[in-house]
Structures are given as structure tokens and as C-alpha cells.
Amino acid sequence: MSLGPRLIIALDFPAAAPALALAARLDPRHCRLKVGKELFTAAGPALLERLQARGFEVFLDLKFHDIPNTCAAACRAAAELGVWMLNVHASGGSRMLDAARAAVDAASRRPLLIAVTVLTSQERADLAEIGLDVEPAQQVARLAALAAAHGIDGVVCSAREASALRVAHGAGFRLVTPGIRPAGADTFDQRRVVTPADALAAGSDYLVIGRPVTAAADPLAALTALAASLPAEPV
Ligand SMILES: O=C(O)c1cc(=O)[nH]c(=O)n1[C@@H]1O[C@H](COP(=O)(O)O)[C@@H](O)[C@H]1O
């Protein structure tokens, strides 16, 4: 099974213009694009249409987390935008996951439905603060098992957890890993970071990369260097 381009560039921009400007320098054969809360709130579905018209597959990262009915309706609306992938929070629980899955299953072009486990910006102390006295890896394993049991296509996690999840859930379970940082790069607010090559070696299917590319003085050069640090795309 070909997974297509493994790199997903996070277009975390405040408006359509800088996002389109970067997309114009990228090749849909080499990467996919992620549109998240900031850009989608600012630019809306029209931007998705423009990116998709340029041949990009889009991960719409709105991390829905709500009562089952509301979450399912949001997933239905997102699927109608023709996106390749969308996500919900696994911690919304099994009834929410079932409702989200039923909504995407009914779509004419079914997107991949991915569940966010523990945000890559969180470490043990962040979980303790919200009443979870566990290591992130343990909570990720729990939430991934819940997602898998409810027919979700995969999870967002740190690549630190990827090898254990690959063993637990097998080859078809998509592992989407943000918190990717080339060695020595600024981690910013991320905590569970992994280098691009280590993330792939650990079994990540897709590497989500934002600021190491988008905040670089020359984003294209940063992306080229990053891609060069990886083994050739498997086909
Ligand atoms: O769902 C996501 O994409 C996501 C989940 C997560 O646990 N951590 C995480 O960083 N993300 C997103 O991945 C991107 C990472 O961006 P950088 O930290 O700039 O590389 C951001 O757009 C985040 O919203």
C-alpha cells in the first residue's frame, strides 16, 4: 500500500495569502498540507478549494471534541469539503468516536478519520494538572486502543510512541506524528519531539512539520534539507 507523500506541512498562517504563497513553492507530489484552526478560521473553505485545485491533499486539523451529535455534524461538514484527512480528540470517548466514524463512512468521498491522543506539547506534568497521573505514553496507548476499537483509521501521537503503537495495532493503523524537529532546531512549545529520520524509523506514517519550515528564513531550503535527511519515499 502506498501512503503517498509522508510529509505534511502545517500551514499555520493568519491569512490565505501567506499560505498560498508557500503552497505555490511546494509540489503536491512531495508533500501534503495541513490547515488548522488559525488558518481555517481566517480563510475558511474557499482556501481549501484553492489548495485542492492545485493538486494538494489536505489534512483539515480542527480536532473536533464535542457531544457526539455536534462532533458528527462537524465531521460530515468537513468531509463535504473533500479533504483527505480530518481529526477528532480520542478523549471525546467511544460514543463520540462512533458518531464521527458513522459520519465519515456516509461521505461520498470518505476522508481518513484520525484521533488525537495526547498533544505533543504535553508532558507528564501537564497530564497531572488535569487529573491524569500517568506517563504520556501510557495515556496515548489507552486512547489509541479506544480509537482502534471504534474503527478509527489511526491516531495523532508523538513519534516517541510510534513503535509501541505499530506493534499494538499493526501496519494499517495510521500514525500521524507532529512535534517533528531536526536535531538542534527550536522546539518552541512542543515537548515530545523527535527528529524526522527517527520518526520514520519508529514507524510514523506521516510527519507533520510546521515552524521548522514555515518560520525558516528560506522555507523551501529548510524543507529540502529536511527531506534530504530522510530515506527515499517508499512506493
Ligand atoms: O493534530 C495535530 O496536527 C497536532 C497534534 C499534536 O498533538 N501536536 C501538534 O503539534 N499538532 C499540530 O501540528 C503542528 C505542529 O507545528 P510545529 O510545532 O510548528 O511543527 C501544529 O499545526 C499543531 O497544531
Image (cartoon, grey):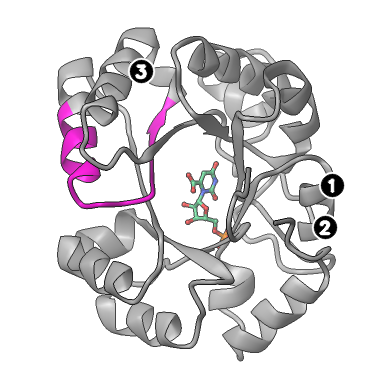
Determine the image quadrant of residue 220. Answer: bottom right
Residue at screen point 48% across, 88% down: 25
Quarter placement of the N terminus: top right
The amino acid sitting under disc 2 is Ala
Residue 12 found in image quarter: bottom left
Real-space CA distance between mark 1 and mark 2, rounded to the nearest whole angstrom? 6 Å
Indicate the position of residue 214 as horizontal and vertical percent values.
Answer: 53, 76
Quote the CA–CA distance across marks 3 and 2: 31 Å
- Tell me if residue 59 is in the magenta stretch: no
Kindly identify which residue carries mark 3: 97
Report if residue 85 lies within the magenta region.
Answer: yes
Q: Residue at x 40, y 68 (%)?
A: 56
**Viewed as shown, does residue 33 lie left or right of 82?**
right
Q: Quadrant of the C terminus?
A: bottom right
Secondary structure of the residue carrying numbered label 2: helix
Label pair 1/3, CB-CB below 8 angstroms? no
Q: Which mark, residue 197?
A: 2
Q: Is residue 34 left or right of residue 159?
A: left
Q: Is residue 135 visible?
A: no
Provide residue 233's location: percent of width, then percent of height: 73, 62
Q: For mark 2, does the 10 Å Cα neighbourhood hold few (<14), some (14 to 19), or many (20 or more) residues?
A: many
Q: Is residue 11 left or right of residue 157?
A: left
| Label drawn at residue 209 | none
Q: Which residue is mark 1?
A: 201
Q: Secondary structure at mark 1?
A: helix
Q: Which residues are magenta?
A: 73-89
